Amino acid sequence: MKLLAIVGSPRLKGNTNYLVDQALGEAARLGAQTEKLVLSQYEVNPCLGHKDCASFDSCQQKDDAGWILDRFCQADGVILATPVYWYNVTAQMKAFIDRNYFLYKHDRKSQARAVGVIVVAEMEGIEDTLHTLRQFVDWTFAVEEDRIFIASGYALRPGEVKNNLHLVEEVRKLGRQMVESLKEGS
Ligand SMILES: Cc1cc2nc3c(=O)[nH]c(=O)nc-3n(C[C@H](O)[C@H](O)[C@H](O)COP(=O)(O)O)c2cc1C
């Protein structure tokens, strides 16, 4: 069972990464093979909006999005994690979402059967951010509603979220629930 986390925060020691590590740690403890991809570590350029996207065999942009999207499609479970930047996902996460347009135009969907969503903010914008991610999840995955797990909460400075014990426990639970639901469905 493969669990892939896509992380939109550029802070490697930040809150989102900490929360994702907690979720993946629990998943690994229950036997999942886990992988974390921090988008800022790779070249994932914004979509260029080719009007003939569907006619191309591969995306015209030769950057890291190609292999990341392949891995995204092959994972059994996917976690999407981002801090709130200006009431929404970060630019890194938005570029990744937009690059999924190639899959959409080629009728390709992720085969994931469980999805996790993790969002952290200083104080405002979690609802808007979750709305964006939910729209993406609904278009991109063929996953049942009871296999979508969401955890969100507040922290500001890098690593501060360690003190938000409720949220830390929520994301650990999210990791466990994803593995349990995948085991049920296999
Ligand atoms: C460019 C930028 C925009 C931000 N916009 C918001 C916002 O709209 N609402 C909010 O509550 N926090 C906002 N924040 C704060 C971050 O969401 C917060 O610091 C979060 O913990 C960062 O997570 P990270 O450590 O995983 O990167 C913003 C931070 C930055 C750098």
Image (spheres, rainbow, N blue to C red):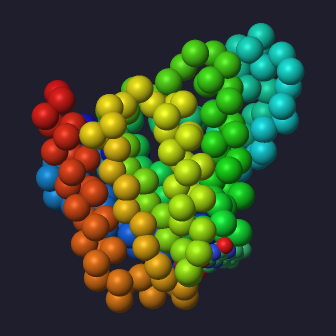
Give the quarter of the figure containing the N terminus: top left
Question: Which one is in front, 13 or 111?
Answer: 111
Q: Residue at x 31, y 74 (%)?
A: 168
Query: Which x, y percent locates residue 69?
Result: 56, 35
Q: Is residue 46 above or below residue 10?
A: above
Residue 114 is left or right of residue 65, and the answer is left
Residue 152 is left or right of residue 69, and the answer is left
Residue 90 is left or right of residue 36, and the answer is right
Location of residue 169 by image quarter = bottom left
Q: Residue at x 68, y 26 (%)?
A: 102
Location of residue 53 by image quarter = top right
Q: Is residue 182 above or below residue 120?
A: above
Q: Residue at x 27, y 40 (%)?
A: 146
Query: Which x, y percent locates residue 62?
Result: 75, 34
Residue 82 is left or right of residue 148, and the answer is right
Numbered disc total: 0
Query: Which x, y percent locates residue 57?
Result: 71, 14
Does residue 154 appear anywhere in the picture? yes
Question: Which one is in front, 3 or 181?
Answer: 181
